[in-house]
């Protein structure tokens, strides 16, 4: 993906979370939102989104924890 596609993905995930907060893909949209912020270089926001997922009952909390840890690791390089 390029920067324009990442921004489009971020907008789509954010809109989907607002429009369908309890939809079948709500958890995936939340994780996708964090990933989109990460790919755009918005690391602080990505960490915040991942930590929201980790602190919730989201079934993708383990995936969010992995991505958050990898992001911290890669930031230290």
Image: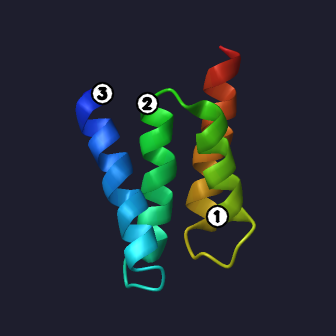
Element type at marker 3? helix
> Where is 3 relative to 58, above or below?
above
Q: Between disc 2 and disc 1, whose residue precedes?
A: 2
Q: Which mark is residue 53?
A: 1
Which of marks 2 and 3 precedes in the sequence?
A: 3
Disc number placed over residue 66 in the picture, else none: none
Residue drawn at the location 60% of the way across and 75% of the way down? 58
Distance CA(mark 3)–CA(mark 2): 6 Å
SS for callout 2 = loop
Report crowding for label 1: few under 14, some 14 to 19, many 20 or more residues within 10 A (C-alpha).
many
In the shown orientation, is residue 7 left or right of residue 33?
left
Residue 43: where, in percent of width, then height? 60, 32
- What is the quadrant of residue 32 in the picture? bottom left
The x and y percentages for residue 64 are 59, 56
Q: Which residue is mark 2?
A: 40
| CA–CA distance in space, label 3 to label 1 | 24 Å
Of mark 3 and mark 1, the one earlier in the sequence is 3
Q: Position of residue 26 (x, y in %)?
A: 44, 75
Q: Residue furthest top?
A: 77
């Amino acid at each position: 993906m390029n920067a324009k596609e990442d921004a489009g993905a971020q907008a789509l995930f954010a809109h989907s979370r607002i429009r369908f907060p309890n939809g079948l893909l709500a958890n995936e949209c939340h994780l996708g939102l964090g990933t989109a912020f990460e790919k755009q270089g918005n690391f602080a926001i990505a960490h915040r989104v991942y930590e929201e997922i980790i602190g919730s009952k989201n079934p993708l909390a383990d995936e969010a924890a992995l991505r958050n840890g990898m992001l911290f690791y890669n930031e230290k390089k």
